[in-house]
Image (cartoon, rainbow, N blue to C red):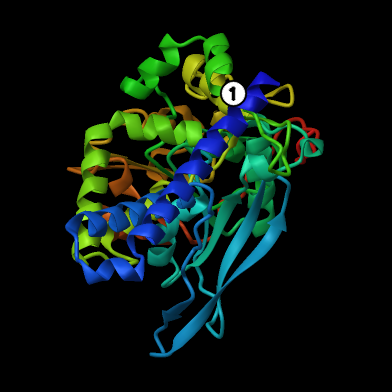
């Protein structure tokens, strides 16, 4: 019960701060006060506006905001977000451009489940949808998933990815961004063993911790330093009574956000102080740079406790992917089973989360893949975010990834026969 009380206390604090902001904004904007202009009142109203918006965004799932796009015919076409596969912990969605011919490139964009919603990849999707059919893994907020839906750990995540790949078929090109890279590699390998004909054509891994120990960072040091008991005691709480997932053990989004903010507290504090002054001077807008960034950054989601804990233990502490000893449902997945899926890795030279060396380690694990089906790219001067969004992605990395996809879109070599056929595994979380 104490875990549930802590969860509700955090939500109460967030709700109270949102109310305080709304109250300050309303009171300081009272029409009668305009008779005697006072800079303090303008500042109080601005503080209230920024505070209300900040704490409100923490429990709101951002919209994709991709409603139309201009195609080669010069016309604006509606973009519909359609659910292709619906599952308890995440859906496979498709950005369907109405009235446009189906594009030859079919891309599965695997979004991270690391505290933020899949909408974090909005700019990535917008850049690819121009000439690709884009599908995205849209993970759900654990607080909204009833306990009756069961558990969800790294093995269930891997099985979800396998089902999504099977649904899209063998002409799919998979791009995994950051956290899901090791599990996407494992899912591809397991699919190569289980159903070789369903393997995707290419697999692009962007800034993922395939081998976290290849180049240690603060993230990997923390993973080794803290014990699993300490993590469970300090990070895990039960969802409170307000949500459908009441009683589910989670790593709360609000707790994650406090960790994110504390790492760069001075920078965030300055950003909010500057925004308050801009609002007071009438220089801010609903979609200015500050709001665009923080509307997404502050929107956090709860992670299933078993997923978070198993990620730390099995991917970071035990290095099961790096040592090719990862198991799914009691079966050891052999990454060397990937024999006809072209694999490319992308890293940022200034990435301080998944440092250069961690992702490219995937190529050494693909022992069954010929060298001409492997590729690696190190983007100079790019940080973690820049390798899948921003200038580095748009100008350099995206063209390279699409060239890699096009060069491996010809007729596929027949998948090698396995000696023994593996038993299929149910993909629904137990």
Task: Give the secondary structure at mark 1.
Answer: loop
On screen, residue 46 versus residue 428, left or right, reads left
Q: In this view, does 390 lie above or below 70?
A: above
* x and y percentages locating residue 246 in the rendered image: 73, 36
Asked if residue 234 shows in the view, the reply is: yes
**Percent position (x, y) of residue 332?**
66, 22
Question: Which corner quadrant holds the C terminus?
Answer: top right
Q: Is residue 323 above or below residue 170?
A: above
Q: Residue at x 42, y 24 (%)?
A: 211
Q: In front: 94, or 242?
A: 242
The quadrant the N terminus occupies is top right
Q: 141 and 113: which one is in front?
A: 141
Residue at 56% across, 81% down: 98
| Residue found at x 18% / y 43% | 380
Determine crowd level at label 1: few under 14, some 14-19, many 20+ residues with C-alpha closer than 10 A.
many
Q: Which is nearer the eye, 181 or 385?
A: 385
Front-most of residues 91 and 129: 91
- Residue 417 coordinates in the image, percent (x, y): 69, 39
Q: Is residue 355 visible?
A: no
* Vertical order, 247 against 414 (above or below): above
Q: Mark 1 points at which residue?
A: 236
Residue 373 image-quadrant placement:
top left
- Residue in the image at 49% along x and 75% along y: 67
The percent position of residue 297, horizontal first and vertical second, equals 39, 47
Q: Is residue 139 left or right of residue 281?
A: right
């Amino acid at each position: 019960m104490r875990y549930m009380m802590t969860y509700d206390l955090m939500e109460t604090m967030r709700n109270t701060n949102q109310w305080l902001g709304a109250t300050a904004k309303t009171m300081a904007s009272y029409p009668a006060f305009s008779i005697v202009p006072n800079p303090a009142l303008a500042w109080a109203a601005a503080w209230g506006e920024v505070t209300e918006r900040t704490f409100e965004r923490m429990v709101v799932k951002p919209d994709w905001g991709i409603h139309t796009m201009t195609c080669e015919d010069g016309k604006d076409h509606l973009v519909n977000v359609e659910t292709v596969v619906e599952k308890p912990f995440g859906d496979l969605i498709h950005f369907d451009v109405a009235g446009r011919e189906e594009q030859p490139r079919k891309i599965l964009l695997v979004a991270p489940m690391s505290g933020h919603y899949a909408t974090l990849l909005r700019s990535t999707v917008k850049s690819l949808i121009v000439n690709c059919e884009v599908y995205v893994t849209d993970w759900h907020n654990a607080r909204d998933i009833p306990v009756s839906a069961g558990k969800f750990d790294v093995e269930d995540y891997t099985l979800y990815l396998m089902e999504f790949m099977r649904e899209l078929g063998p002409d799919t090109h998979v791009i995994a961004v950051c956290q899901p890279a090791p599990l996407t590699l494992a899912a591809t390998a397991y699919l190569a063993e289980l159903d070789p004909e369903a393997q995707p054509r290419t697999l692009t891994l962007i800034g993922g911790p395939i081998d976290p120990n290849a180049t240690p960072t603060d993230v990997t040091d923390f993973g080794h330093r803290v014990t699993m008991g300490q993590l469970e005691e300090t990070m895990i709480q039960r969802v409170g009574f307000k949500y459908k997932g009441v009683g589910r053990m989670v790593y709360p989004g609000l707790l994650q956000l406090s960790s994110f903010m504390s790492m760069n507290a001075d920078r965030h504090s300055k950003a909010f102080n500057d925004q308050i002054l801009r609002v007071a001077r009438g220089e801010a807008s609903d979609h200015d740079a500050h709001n665009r960034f923080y509307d997404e950054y502050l929107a956090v989601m709860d992670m299933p406790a078993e997923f978070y804990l198993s990620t730390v233990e099995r991917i970071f502490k035990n290095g099961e992917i790096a040592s090719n000893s990862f198991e799914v449902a009691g079966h050891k997945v052999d990454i060397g089973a990937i024999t006809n899926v072209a694999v490319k890795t992308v890293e940022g030279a200034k990435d301080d989360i998944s440092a250069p060396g961690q992702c490219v380690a995937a190529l050494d694990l693909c022992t069954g893949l010929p060298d001409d089906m492997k590729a690696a790219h190190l983007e100079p001067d790019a940080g973690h975010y820049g390798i899948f969004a921003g200038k580095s992605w748009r100008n350099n990395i995206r063209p390279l990834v699409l060239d890699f996809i096009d060069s491996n879109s010809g007729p596929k070599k027949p998948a090698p026969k396995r000696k023994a056929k593996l038993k299929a595994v149910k993909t629904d979380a137990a």
